[in-house]
Image (tube, rainbow, N blue to C red):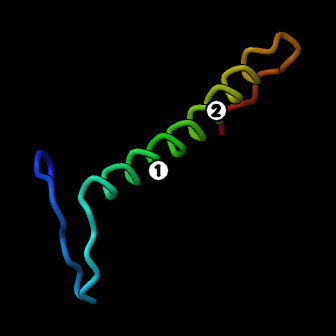
Amino acid sequence: MLGRSGEVVDAAGQSWRLQDIRAAIVVIMVFTMFFTSLLALIRLLDDARPDRKPCPNN
């Protein structure tokens, strides 16, 4: 799929352009990475609060 252009056909006979598939994958990756990065940032900022007491390790 990398480096190729054109169309592919699925089992139902539907034709798909490879460029459209790549664009959809990029959009999904961007939103997934943005969401997980935002959660990580919130957790880091919450852990860095000076008034937060450390949790004991279980």
* Image-based side of 8 in relation to 50, left or right: left
- In primary-sequence order, the first of circles 2 and 1 is 1
Q: Residue at x 83, y 10 (%)?
A: 50
Asked whether the residues under the numbered discs 2 and 1 touch, taking CB atoms below 8 Å apart as contact, a structural biologist would say no
Q: Residue at x 80, y 15 (%)?
A: 49
Q: Position of residue 54 (x, y in %)?
A: 76, 22
In the displayed structure, would residue 35 be above or below residue 45? below
Q: Residue at x 23, y 80 (%)?
A: 10
Say what amino acid the circle numbered 1 marks: Ile
Say what amino acid the circle numbered 2 marks: Leu
- Identify residue for label 1: 28
Q: Residue at x 28, y 81 (%)?
A: 14
How far apart, in angstroms, are the residues tagged by discs 2 and 1? 15 Å
Q: Residues within 10 Å of mark 2 (few under 14, many from 20)?
A: few
Secondary structure under tag 1 reads helix
- Identify residue for label 2: 38
Q: Nearer the viewer, residue 9 or 40?
A: 9
The residue most toward the top is 50
Q: Position of residue 41 (x, y in %)?
A: 64, 25
